[in-house]
């Protein structure tokens, strides 16, 4: 019996000596990892209300804050491909930014106009492409990459799309970009009676499920949204004042959790 106890004790000692999951820090909004040539691995996150991109060191200390200036009448919609050598050969940080403007055609109808820009950390623009709402980088080899930009026209039905292909000097980081749904932030935020939730470009072809959660992650509501919608109007009158999160799933792909406030 004594020998059996020793074996069990040794098992638990060995088990507890293995590294375990531990919380290191909590950063606001969705934060991603990337590898900057000449710098190394960093984290980046975006405050869409202030149009700022924050670059963090691996110890989570703030390294740089990049102000992204939206064109007139537009809002910052998404940021991707934070890099140093992907779009040109200097040492400054560049990123791909997408801006959006909502054109109302009635009380409950309208469409989006997108603009994609590549800018560096001091605001110099290397690409300005009206209509481009989604872009992706493909590595063709270890030394060659292409930037594909999808240009949409949602003012017509059915909407149209074409693809602009650009040669770029760098190659994609070994850390992949997030593969979640591409979509903007809800507005107005904070909301009182109604909040508008932009949907992904894939929602034009596929139905969408929206999951609404409270701050504890408990599901409050799930709603099915038919295809061919760019924006979903969520009635918030029945919600108590406070903070809420939502996730959108389209064609098997989920967005990151987005936050809004009701007051």
Image (tube, rainbow, N blue to C red):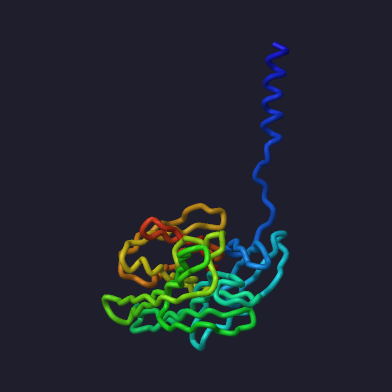
Give the residue drawn at x 27%, y 78%. Answer: 157
Q: Quadrant of the C terminus?
A: bottom right
Q: Position of residue 88 (x, y in %)?
A: 57, 77
> Which quadrant of the structure image shows residue 39?
bottom right
Left/right of residue 133 with respect to residue 119 in the rendered view: left
- Position of residue 24 in the picture relative to residue 111 (left or right): right
- On the image, the x and y values in percent for residue 34 come to 60, 63
- Image point 61% across, 63% down: which residue? 35
Which image quadrant is residue 30 in? bottom right
Q: Confirm whether residue 194 shows in the render.
A: no
Q: Is residue 37 above or below residue 212?
A: below
Task: Name the one closer to the observer, 210 or 148.
Answer: 148
Q: Please state which of residues 222 and 31 is positioned toward the viewer in this rendering.
A: 31
Q: Quadrant of the N terminus?
A: top right
Q: Give percent across and percent down for residue 65.
A: 67, 74
Q: Is residue 238 above or below residue 92?
A: above
Q: Give coordinates of residue 100: x percent, y percent.
A: 46, 79
The answer to whether any part of residue 20 appears in the image is: yes
Nearest to the observer: residue 106 or residue 27: 27
Please tell me which residue is depicted at 59% across the width and 70% down the height of the picture: 83
- In this picture, is 5 found above or below 45? above
Single out the residue that lies furthest toward the bottom.
72
């Amino acid at each position: 019996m004594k020998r059996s106890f020793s074996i069990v004790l040794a098992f638990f000692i060995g088990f507890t000596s293995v590294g375990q999951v531990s919380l290191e820090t909590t950063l606001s909004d969705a934060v991603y990892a990337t590898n900057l040539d000449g710098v190394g691995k960093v984290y980046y996150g975006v405050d869409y209300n202030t149009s700022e991109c924050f670059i963090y060191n691996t110890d989570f200390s703030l390294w740089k804050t990049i102000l992204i200036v939206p064109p007139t009448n537009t809002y910052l919609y998404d940021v991707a491909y934070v890099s140093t050598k992907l779009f040109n050969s200097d040492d400054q940080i560049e990123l791909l930014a997408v801006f959006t403007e909502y054109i109302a055609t009635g009380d409950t109808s309208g469409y989006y106009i997108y603009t994609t820009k590549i800018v560096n950390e001091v605001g110099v623009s290397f690409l300005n492409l009206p209509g481009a709402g989604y872009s992706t980088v493909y590595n063709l080899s270890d030394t060659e990459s292409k930037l594909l930009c999808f240009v949409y026209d949602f003012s017509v039905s059915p909407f149209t799309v074409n693809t602009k292909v650009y040669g770029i000097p760098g190659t994609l980081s070994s850390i992949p970009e997030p593969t979640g749904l591409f979509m903007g932030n809800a507005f107005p935020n904070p909301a009182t009676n109604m909040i508008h939730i932009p949907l992904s470009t894939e929602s034009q072809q596929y139905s969408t499920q929206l999951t609404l959660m409270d701050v504890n992650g408990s599901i409050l509501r799930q709603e099915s949204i038919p295809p061919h919608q760019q924006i979903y109007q969520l009635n918030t009158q029945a919600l108590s004042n406070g903070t809420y999160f939502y996730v959108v799933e389209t064609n098997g792909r989920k967005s990151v959790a987005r936050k809004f406030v009701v007051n």
